[in-house]
Amino acid sequence: QTEEEGAYYLMICIDAVVSCWTFKPSEVSTWKESLLMLEHVKSAVMHFSEFCCCDEARFTREAVLKVAQLSKEAGILSAMALNAFVEAMSSLELSLKLLEMSSDAKKPDFRLARAHSLHELSKIHRYQGRYDDVHQCLMDSLALNKSDDCLTADSLHELGICEMKKHNLDAAASFLQKSLEIRRGLG
């Protein structure tokens, strides 16, 4: 098959995986079924990233965003349901790689998607006690995010938790207060 045909069939596979993927982090009832699909998701994302590295022009920006979201969600599920932090980190880093290498990397929707993936990656670092990495991920997430006040509040909250873990209580209180002010402003 030609590379063009390969890209076409790969997108059919990606769309099939997306249609079967029911994972919602806040809905524990979706986790069990999603675990059955997890390896399929990771495999499809890996194939996409290999294809995308060779020729991004074959895929739409929507496809890149869709696959980066799948990879991010695979990372979240790996961490939350399996405590598989190495796998979670790998999936989240792959999500970031897809978004960063895109020619659309500087566009607002790609920046926001990267901010979300960095926020999730910060949690993996926190679970592993890597507080400097937590801080860096969250600061990068805040720098990329110019439109999502909920994400800003969540990132500030996570920074507060990180500072508490490091026993920097004044810094923790400051981040948590800023997070609370944003949350109150959202209603």
Image (cartoon, rainbow, N blue to C red):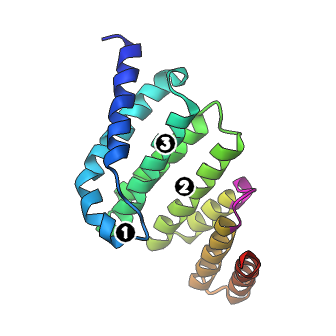
Q: Position of residue 182 (x, y in %)?
A: 74, 76
Q: Is residue 176 magenta?
A: no
Identify the mark nearer the N-term, 1 or 2. Answer: 1
Residue 81 relative to residue 132: left or right: left
Residue range highlighted in magenta:
142-149
Identify the mark nearer the N-term, 2 or 3. Answer: 3
Crowd band around label 3 with a 10 angstrom C-alpha radius: few (<14), some (14–19), many (20+): some
Front in this rendered view, residue 136 or 53: 53
Residue 71 relative to residue 17: left or right: right
- Picture layout, residue 66 above or below residue 21: above
Q: Which residue is mark 3?
A: 66
Q: Which residue is mark 2?
A: 117
**Three-letter code for the amino acid on which mark 3 is drawn:** Lys
Q: How far apart, in angstroms, are the residues tagged by discs 1 and 2?
A: 15 Å
Q: Residue at x 54, y 55 (%)?
A: 117
Front in this rendered view, residue 112 or 127: 112
Q: Residue at x 31, y 70 (%)?
A: 29
Q: Residue at x 36, y 58 (%)?
A: 86
Question: Which quadrant of the structure image shows residue 175?
Answer: bottom right
Mark 3: which secondary structure? Answer: helix
Q: How many marks?
A: 3
Q: Is residue 83 visible?
A: no
Q: Which residue is mark 1?
A: 80
Q: Position of residue 81 (x, y in %)?
A: 31, 68
Of tags 3 and 1, which is closer to the observer?
3
Q: How far apart, in angstroms, are the residues tagged by discs 3 and 1?
A: 21 Å
